[in-house]
Image (cartoon, grey):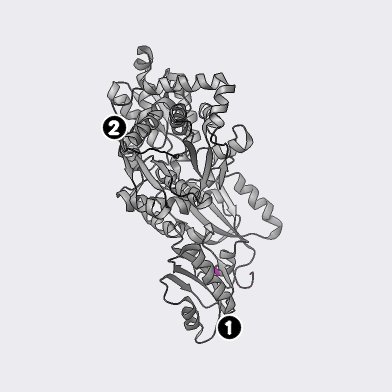
Amino acid sequence: MLLEQFDSERLRRLEKNDPALETLLSDYANAIENASVYDVAVRSPLEWAPVLSGRLGNQLYIKREDLQSVFSFKLRGAYNKVAHLDEAQRARGVICASAGNHAQGLALAGARLGIPATIVMPRTTPPIKVESVRALGGNIVLHGDSFDEASEEAHRLTQEQGLAYVPPYDDPQVIAGQGTVGREILEQIDAHGLENLDAVFIPVGGGGLLAGVAAWIKQRRPEVKIIGVEAEDSACLYRAMEAGERVTLAQVGLFADGVAVRQVGEEPFRLARHLVDAMVLVTVDEICAAISDIFRDNRSLAEPAGALAVAGVKRYVEMTGVREQTFVAIESGANVNFDRLRHIAERAELGEHREALLAVTIPERPGSFRQFCEIIGRRSVTEFNYRYANASQAHIFVGVGLRDGVAEKEALIERLRRADYPVVDMSNNEMAKVHVRYMVGGRSQHVDDEIVFRFEFPERPGALLDFLNSIGGRWNISLFHYRNHGSAYGRVLVGLQVPEAEHDDCRASFDELHYEYEEETSNPAYRFFLDSPQQG
């Protein structure tokens, strides 16, 4: 999805008609120029991405903020904020709530400046991040299962102990620190001898990095487009741009946890609404494909949030068809858990349209497998799942390797349908990708009144048992699948035998759990491969 806000002359017109905006940009430019970041930050390189540039027909440069000492840009804003505190505030200490990169940035800032730093983290925070903060000297307080709960505790401790709260994005000094990334980009573009820079793509969570980079670049080079990139399931700035005011999302996706923010910051939005030229939304699969692309070009492993901008460049080029332009994408971080890489690799193939997942109904007779494979041809079969269902037909779940992306997939589906094979494309079916592909063959012949739900719950030792205890024993569990993807949240597919008259009671009990969930009883992936024959 693409939201284009403004034409290329918009900022010049706004400046002429709105002196307050010009003053705001000038103030931020001065703050960025005088920001204290280089005691802890390095001037990260701006690297050409030759493979991606060739594929996209545009010149792409990647700003390598993953090469900072804490593997993220976040130390810039945190250090600049702490460096500007007065002596009395420094003596009392600083505090923040964070499950990741901001936590490491503040811990490092406190250690360098000799200031006690308290970091409140959710109990669901992966151990690798907790240990990283502890190694930097941070005083860790584990509280709650979510960022919101940790944030509430951090604000309580702020009042109780008189600590200085350091926000992750909604603060002018934090924004100015992040804005040094934009200053470096323009300096490095000049050093590369490039005459034109057409657009800078920036990942968006709370908006601090976007606001800082946009403030510097639009003040110096207003013709350069500023394009924000968000995950489709965490699009707080995109929705705010649509509405003309900040909105609070009911829920956010958890895959790109570094940008999983329900509401864009007030100060970042004040800047972004004037300075951002377009917003691009990308899917989980597209983020995974971008992680793969970045690795091919510079052998770095970006975290999901760190790869957002590159995913946004690819999506933008696909949607607009632009060629022969020069883009910069900010690779914002590389704090990824190693055990998430399997999941990322699986989804990257789908995000790059190098694999199709298909549900195909075939006749249950000798030779039907062979005929199906002849239609598939010499393509690579990545997986093939089948179990006998009844005497007349069978459903198979098949993964097929693709060379020519979406067009090849659509041609293959059409060829199968012409041969009288009913086909359902599962390539964009989240339930199929996360759960069903690992469960095919799990039909039961004797399940009545089954309804199916997909849950996400905080991941920690004992979390699975806590989840089972919380859903209680009123209804029989008839189906259960759980996979840990190395993230802070576990994903469960659960079937319950619930008489129709009790459906509302069942959903009401789930609402009380305060877990994110979706009903999936009508999902074709369930109907084809898991549903009881007598029910389906």
The boundaries of the magenta stretch are 529-536
**Image coordinates for residue 407, horizontal then vertical, percent:** 51, 65
The residue pinned by badge 2 equals 42
What mark, if any, has residue 117 been given in the picture? none
- Determine whether 353 is above or below 421 in the image: above
Amino acid on which the number 1 mark rests in the picture: Ala
Q: Is residue 133 visible?
A: yes
Q: Nearer the viewer, mark 2 or mark 1?
A: 2
Residue at 56% in and 48% down:
1
Q: Main secondary structure of the magenta part?
A: loop
**Residue nearest the viewer, comparing 55 with 426:** 55
Distance of mark 2 from mark 1, alpha carbons? 67 Å
The residue pinned by badge 1 equals 391
**Image coordinates for residue 326, horizontal then vertical, percent:** 41, 43
Amino acid on which the number 2 mark rests in the picture: Val
SS at mark 2 in the image = loop
**Residue nearest the viewer, comparing 283 with 453:** 283
Residue at 46% in and 68% down:
399
SS at mark 1 in the image = loop
Q: Is residue 166 visible?
A: no
Q: From the image, which quarter does the C terminus lie in?
A: bottom right
Residue at 53% in and 49% down:
320
**Residue nearest the viewer, comparing 36 with 514:** 36
The answer to whether residue 419 is left or right of residue 206 is right
Residue at 55% in and 75% down:
416
**Residue nearest the viewer, comparing 393 with 333:** 333
**Image coordinates for residue 91, horizontal then vertical, percent:** 34, 15
- Determine whether 271 is above or below 398 in the image: above
**Image coordinates for residue 273, horizontal then vertical, percent:** 56, 31
* Quadrant hosting residue 447: bottom right
